[in-house]
Image (cartoon, coloured by chain):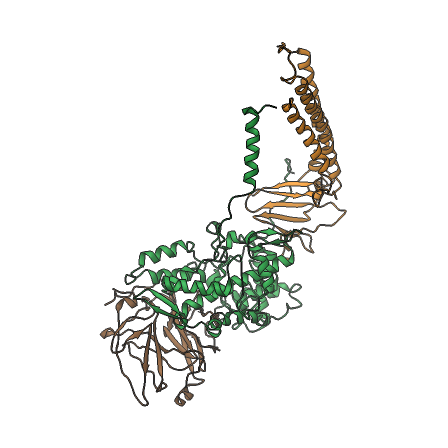
Amino acid sequence: MTLSMTRLIPLACLGALALFATGCSKPEPPRFHLNVVAAVKARVGAPTQQQVANILTALYGTPDQPRLPPEVPFKEALIARAAGPVASDIHGRKVGLYREHCVHCHGISGDGMGPTAAFLNPYPRDYRMGVFKFKATEGKEMPTDSDLNKVLEEGIPGTSMPSFRMLAAEDRQALVEYVKYLSLRGQTELNMYDTVNDFLTIDEAAGTAKPDSLDKSVLSDMYAPFAGKWKDAAEKILPAGTVPEDFISNNQKYVELGHKLYFDKASANCQQCHGTSALGDGQLTGYDDWTKLVNDAITVADNEGNKARSADLALIKEFSLKPRNIIPRNLRSGIYRGGRRPIDLYYRIMAGINGSGMPAHNTLLKTEEERWAIVAYVLNLPYQAGGALAFEQEQIAPSRETN
Amino acid sequence: MSKYWSLMALTTLIFGALCFMVAPTTWFWDKPMWLPADYSEHGGEIDKLFYFILALTGVVFLATEFILFYFMWKYDANVNKQPVVYSHGSHSLEIVWTIIPAATLLFIAIVQFNSWAESKMQNPMYGADGIAGTDDDMQPTVEVTARQWEWRIRYPGADGRLGTPDDIFDVNELHVPANENVVVSLKSSDVLHSFFIPNLRVKQDAVPA
Amino acid sequence: MPAPPGELTCNKDEGTCCREKLIDNSLVVGSGNGVANVFVFLRSKGKTPVRVHEDYAKKEGTEVVLDNVKCMFQPHCAAVWTKQKLMIKNSDPVGHNTKYDSSIQGFNDLLNVGGAALEKTFKAGENKPAGISCSIHPWMQGKLLVRDNPYFAITNDQGEFEIPNMPAGEELEISFWHERNEKLTKASGDLQLKGGVLKVKLAENQTTEAAFVFDPAEFGGK
């Protein structure tokens, strides 16, 4: 056959497509970012930051090749499965789970500042402070594996965190281990900023920072307290009494007692923050822990004695999301972020919600009856008049004729 | 090689037919790329419609492509040296090939009336009188609220009524009784979502507000 | 001389909290330019435990009180030894909560009205003071330092402090910390700071008095 232009063009197009299908050169592998806001707050200069970054890489590896410091009780095999680029093996078993499911909101370093984060309310969690809200452990302890798994399985209603129940349980466990890994890395970094003089010799005039002898015990001090806290989490579960037997049958009694305690200044006094109508309008000017870090960094950077003032402020702006106030929960909405079982509410109220302003009530409410009364009252609020869960409208399409 | 373009046209015919022949098999993939298993009562109606249209359009497709190939082969410029003939068209041919497709489409439209009515309108949900909004309507078995990016599910609980403190909440896992009519009250809390259960041949948009 | 302190925004429980103007007490300067609320503490070097003078034995088990008075922390800055107890009280007719932002032993507990004091003991010393705050009244801020040795002090209104009975004959590293800019690094006067710490060796029975003059920039001024 003759090869004219009209025959050549479609063949050439097919050929070009085939070439592009094989892909371009490999992109650069992603890298962890430093917690720049915390570095500015701790007034840690660039040479010191570089040393910190080197040590973190030595201890924790990179997003594609993670590793664990010695004697950290996390499961390396699962972390390896969750890390790295998205791929699947010959049997269809997925790897790179974190990058597939989480990174677009939670960021490659677990900083809660992925590409979609700025559009979300509330912002995704920044794991790097080791502060988690929805857990069964006391006060400011770490969450257990089961707490983190529950978040993945149930999602967090009222936020953009969806449920990952459609993933296999082993995939979820791999993601839990990876989140713990990112969190421990972040906690180590924050600790290092507080203790730079313990392991670096810093010459501010020359602008250099050199590591002193970084033997095992010095390195271990950087992460061991936090690894220990993660390890102990399972033992720090708040001792919760069991739900009283008459909780459902005699629910009204508990609701009435809870109502009384809600407004009682000598007791739980919930109305101070959650408002007299329980709409969460009692205190609207607070900040959560993550935003406080940003605000504190701004305070440190923003004083006239700081020679790098505008540079520091620009850095903070680049590496943080716009600060927002934290609002106490609207208890009439019927949306319970940490779970809606009575025991979930018990944990939220008695242990407090770490990272937020919600304090622990277990030192104050001493009897089980009082504690479950508050839980019963909170669970009942959305079904009272005007509450969001009362089923008021006719759900089936209305007929055109009405009687 | 002469008749290059006619052979290109033949590939469409062969490739198209091969796709449909290979799709339901597992020769190249783990699961057959065909209709999912049907566990519903009314799903058969919809499947029948699909097969009917597939057969009809398949036959027409094969015929049309073959005719295209045949004429390209027969009248290829390298082989056929007869001069071009300009015809004034054929009035009767035009009528025939307008009326037959129109009739076919009308036929398809009428045939599917029943399927549509059965699955969307003559609904056990409306009770014995078949009128929506009257007292004998079925109460929702479950309320499904779509939100980005999950399904929030609420069951009426022991008292059988939604909106009472004994409601049961779940996410992403819908449990319904087998062999019973089920009414799903479908809502969305943010944008349009499509509530699609392939194995029950159910698809309905969840509309916000 | 730094600018006069600003006023805090008082927007909750006005009847109790906002009767008097609430002054920002993050920088308190006495007459004679003495800076109050500076934490002075001995840095523990490595793992060797610090030799504690036997005089401090009577300090063991004593209480350090942190009170909520008129919706401000009283005192604004507190320091406690791991062998002491922190007692948190609420002397106001409104509820408060006390949140301590330590990364290893933080807490956030509710204080009701007219209730007993909350007792807190700490298991480990910390590297630097951490924040104390109230979520119900967000302007309430303070600092708490927890140390595993008793060699610490907080400067008073005139900027004076005293740490008795420090270990003699060895090189001590002393840190200065103020909430405005955290670690104080630039000082002139009697003794020099190097790398943010004061290195000093005290002989037996020597009492060293020194005046530390800090650059006002350390406190956020010009």
The hue used for chain C is brown
Vertical placement of residue A6 versus C122, above or below: above
Image quadrant holding the N terminus of chain C, namely bottom left
Residue C125 is situated, as x and y percent measured from the top left of the image, at 44, 77
Vertical placement of residue B166 versus A346, above or below: above
Q: Quadrant of residue A95?
A: bottom right
Letter of the chain in orange: B
Residue C168 is situated, as x and y percent measured from the top left of the image, at 35, 87
Asked if one can make out residue A355 in the rendered structure from this viewpoint, the answer is no
Asked if one can make out residue A74 in the rendered structure from this viewpoint, the answer is yes
Residue A310 is situated, as x and y percent measured from the top left of the image, at 31, 56
Residue at 60% x, 50% y: name it.
Answer: B150
**Towards the viewer: A99 or A172:** A99
Q: Quadrant of residue C102?
A: bottom left
Task: Judge from the rendering whether residue A342 lies leftward or rightward of residue A354; answer left or right.
Answer: right
**Towards the viewer: A279 or C54:** C54
Residue C195 is situated, as x and y percent measured from the top left of the image, at 33, 72
Vertical placement of residue A385 versus B130, above or below: below
**Towards the viewer: A143 or C72:** A143
The hue used for chain A is green
Vertical placement of residue C113 versus A147, above or below: below
Total number of numbered labels?
A: 0
Image quadrant holding the C terminus of chain C, namely bottom left
